[in-house]
Image (cartoon, helix red, strand yellow):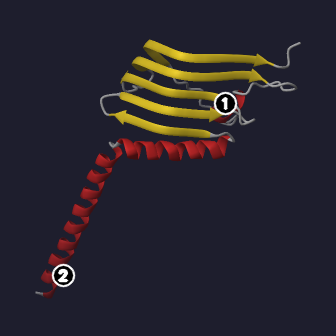
Amino acid sequence: IANLRTVKTIIKILKTVLLFLLLAIVSLVFLLQTESMQTFVARQLADWLSERAGCKVLIDRVGLKWEGSFFIENLYISDQQNDTLLFIHSGKVSGIKPIKENEPLAIEAAEIDGFVFNYSYPENDTKSNLDFLIDFFHSDAGNSDTSSLEIHVADIKMLNGRFRYDDYKSP
């Protein structure tokens, strides 16, 4: 009888733990669908990138929907001289198709409204102000994986933007 009580107690505890885990997973899934949690996660990634890449990355708002749309507001990325490299007031992407092996990422539409992109070659430097980010995301020399990500966008709209190119090392 004592063993039967012990087994029943263990089963009761296991049921409680499993129910708690199931509720935690369901809560996390619902929480990740909220814009505020997505923005929180995006800001954490921006802080991580800021630390690792040696630039400032700031994001005001982010939203991702399960049907394949995404928006971002007030994205700021500095170069290593703390000048603006990229600023996007608002950006939207819709119709994101899931990536299948050996197939490009397909996007139906992308729109950027209110952007600034400053590309420059500083004086006495052989690299542009963008190269540090390219180098940061480039795979290590010891890595033999040469795979790449191909992206196909059917419709792109770029509104109210400004590109600037400065080459301070040219005569």
Task: Please tell me which residue lies in front, 118 or 65.
Answer: 118
**Which residue has dot 1 on it?**
84
Task: Please tell me which residue lies in front, 53 or 99.
Answer: 53
Looking at the rendering, which quadrant does residue 79 occupy?
top right
Horizontally, residue 109 falls left or right of residue 118, namely left
Horizontally, residue 157 falls left or right of residue 85, namely left
Q: Earlier in the sequence, mark 1 or mark 2?
A: 2
Which residue is found at the position 46% from the left and 14% from the top? 156
Q: In the image, which is nearer the foreground, mark 1 or mark 2?
A: 1
Which residue, as the protein is rendered here, is positioned at the far bottom? 2
Which residue is found at the position 25% from the left and 66% from the top? 17
Residue 121 appears in view:
yes
Which residue is found at the position 78% from the left and 25% from the top? 127
Q: Position of residue 153 (x, y in %)?
A: 45, 15
Using a 10 Å C-alpha cutoff, classify the residue at mark 1 as few (fewer than 14 neighbours), some (14 to 19) or many (20 or more).
Answer: some
Q: Which amino acid, by three-letter code, is at mark 2? A: Thr
Which label is found at residue 6? Answer: 2
Using a 10 Å C-alpha cutoff, classify the residue at mark 2 as few (fewer than 14 neighbours), some (14 to 19) or many (20 or more).
Answer: few
Q: Position of residue 75 (x, y in %)?
A: 54, 33
Q: Which amino acid, by three-letter code, is at mark 1? A: Thr
Looking at the rendering, which quadrant does residue 69 occupy?
top left
Q: Position of residue 39 (x, y in %)?
A: 44, 42
Q: Secondary structure at mark 2?
A: helix
Q: Position of residue 128 (x, y in %)?
A: 75, 24
Which residue is found at the position 75% from the left and 35% from the top? 81
* Quadrant into which the N terminus falls: bottom left
Q: CA distance from mark 1 to mark 2?
A: 66 Å
